[in-house]
Image: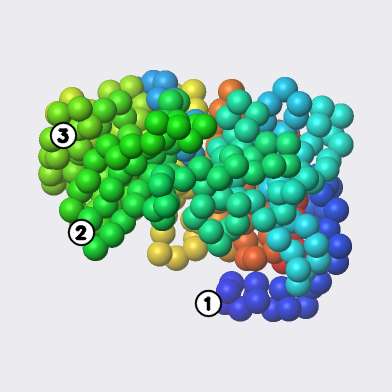
Amino acid sequence: MKKFILILCMITLVGCGNIVPSADMNVSETKNETLTEIQYEDDTEIFPAVTDIEVGEPDKTYYLNRKETLFFDDSGRYYYSYKGGRDSAYYVLLHEDADKKCSFVENADDFNAYLYKDNIFYGCISYRSSKLCSFKDGKYNELKYEEKEISDYYFTDEYIYCLCRNDAGTEILRMRYDGSDTEQVAFINLHIDKYAVHGNNIFYVADYINYGVYDTETKVNTSLDESGAGVFCGDYMYYISAEHHLYRMNLNDYVSEKICENVRTFAFYDDYILYQPYAINTDVDGQIYRLGKGENIKIFDAGEFFENDYYYDIFVIQAEDEHIFIEISSGPYFSYIAEMDIDGNIVETIYAHTSI
């Protein structure tokens, strides 16, 4: 409560002014050499964990469905940054070219991008809308299934899946990326909360307590005692349970194994699992642990990095193409995006909006 009151006071007293996208906004950026010298009180295992696992290479769907901090291609990087002052600030897609020149993407002021594929963005035209559309060169094209209200999109290399809920249950639909070949692939007489697609199988959580897997070829719906909608890697699906524990399910026999307790966000990198712990209090929020190869250790602490006693959330951990990107949030007007190495050193500050 003390931290919460302090944050509210600081938000009230400090104005944002006009925000200019920049990597230098008075952030106390710590260089690699300094960061590696930080001595934590205890670098031993804090949460019980299975550390001798072999993670392997994640399925393509991992790179398509994680929560994005950065979209990037040969022309540069795209990411969301604040535009406007404190009372009018909102997120807008920003493009940073190879020369580090930044410009807001034309006609994207009210666009929420989920995926960037083949130089096309896919997402909703408004943060308050569930209408899916593609976006390229400042122009939108709505993708829809008949006239039904669709939401909860899941992307595979070939299809976009979505849900259509009604009183009788949930339709699972899919379409090509150009909106063609739309079809219903499943109907389940439950209210599906979340799901994940692996080949012909759709793993789902319904009504928060029901778990199952539906085979779109055989049309067989199998109930499971324990499952989730997670990330596919090798012969397993990794998922966070309702109790905030990290499990992995064998895709051959649907048997689950607990890997680590109290996990909020996770990502795969170099046969490690990087995760932010989950806790009722805020003592470990804003921290990142590295699990695997016989260890489970803390490698980053946002509170120590910023040298402030605030509540921090690792909003995103994105591991891709031998890079690790993190996004840290704290209150409505704080966003910090950076690249981090596997030891927790900040390699580059990409974006900082730190008016707390």
What residue is rendered at 35% in x and 30% in y? 232
Regarding mark 3 in the picture, which secondary structure is present there? Answer: loop
Q: Nearer the viewer, residue 263 or 191?
A: 191
The amino acid type of the residue labelled 1 equals Met
Q: Residues within 10 Å of mark 2 (few under 14, many from 20)?
A: few
Left or right placement of residue 194 versus residue 212 in this view: right
The answer to whether the residues at label 3 and label 1 have Cβ atoms under 8 Å apart is: no
The amino acid type of the residue labelled 2 equals Ala
Regarding mark 2 in the picture, which secondary structure is present there? Answer: loop
Left or right placement of residue 132 versus residue 156 in this view: right
**Mark 2 = which residue?**
168
| Image quarter of the C terminus | bottom right
Left or right placement of residue 108 versus residue 120 in this view: right
Q: How many numbered dots are placed on residues in this image? A: 3
Residue 200, percent from left and from top: 26, 28
**Mark 1 = which residue?**
1
Give the Cα separation between the discs numbered 3 and 1. 51 Å
Regarding mark 1 in the picture, which secondary structure is present there? Answer: loop
Q: Where, by quadrant of the figure, is residue 69 drawn?
A: top right
Q: Residues within 10 Å of mark 3 (few under 14, many from 20)?
A: few
**Mark 3 = which residue?**
219
Give the Cα separation between the discs numbered 3 and 2. 18 Å
Residue 146, percent from left and from top: 40, 47
